[in-house]
Image (tube, helix red, strand yellow):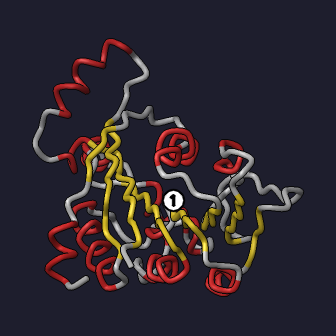
Amino acid sequence: MDASQMEALDRPKRTVMPMRSDERLAQRIATEVLPRYPVTSILDIGCGDGVVSKHLTGQTNYRGLDINEACIYEQEHDNPIVNYVQPEAIAKITQEEGPWDMILLLDVLEHTRDFTGLFEQAMLSSEKYVIVSLPNELFFLDRLRMLRGRELNAHSLDLVGLTEGFKHQFIVNINKARSLLIKKAREHSFLLIEEVVRPLKPKRQLLGPIAQIITKLRQDQVWSQGSIFIFHNHT
């Protein structure tokens, strides 16, 4: 498939998935997004405590990987399908134990220095799908927080001395991130087939109408907390 054909096909479905700020994104992806893309094997890079595995069918072969010094959730060392390793081991395991039907990179790329490196490694080892989620750090509440003199937590100087996995290397602009990922995906014959945007679902019902009004704004970069990108292998 040549570049012009790839570009013509690259018109992703757009889905809206409202979320409260205190919900686990990985859990919502496991219960609402993954069932639309049935597979038999999943590699979850940056798996945390392996929450995705708790919501899969018994027929799915799951493997979770995370960095042993940078997992923000309690590590599940007694779980044989979840492993905590040194950063350099992730690429080796991804390649040697693949190929996989699906590879997950959920809120991972923004922690890496080169941003797209793990994404490219994932595409080399996935036969069907690579799913990437990213926060939108131009979200209106983050903008208001900065205007009030408060920090973006993932960029705070409080993180000095901690390993890279705890902090974001970039302030994520979703529009720029989308363009970067699509460009890299095309180089590996992958296409973006769906993008899930995540408007804020208020905890208080009284704020519901305000949230709905905000989502009417043309720029979802203002009102979406982040995006989930589903890339499909078209080789």
Q: Is residue 104 above or below residue 118?
A: above
Which quarter of the figure has residue 164?
bottom right
Q: Is residue 179 above or below residue 23?
A: below
Judge by depth and name the residue closer to the eye, 224 or 99: 99
Mark 1 packing: few (<14 Cα in 10 Å), some, or many (20+)? many
Q: Secondary structure at mark 1?
A: strand
Quadrant placement of the C terminus? bottom left
Q: Amino acid at mark 1?
A: Leu
Q: Residue drawn 20% across and 60% down?
A: 11
Q: Residue at x 37, y 83 (%)?
A: 188
Q: Position of residue 226 (x, y in %)?
A: 35, 50
Q: Look at 52% across and 36% down and name the residue there.
A: 23
In the image, residue 126 sits, relative to residue 133, either above or below, namely below
Which picture quadrant has residue 197? top left
Q: Residue furthest right?
A: 78
Q: How many badges with numbers are in the image?
A: 1
- The percent coordinates of residue 81 (x first, y second) are 79, 61
Which residue lies at the image location 52% right of the left edge and 35% below the top edge? Answer: 22
> Taking 235 as reference, is 65 left or right?
right
Q: Position of residue 129 (x, y in %)?
A: 47, 65
Asked whether, in this view, residue 143 is left or right of residue 132, the answer is left
Residue under label 1? 106
Looking at the image, which is closer to me, 49 or 72? 49
The image position of residue 195, as x and y in percent, is 31, 53
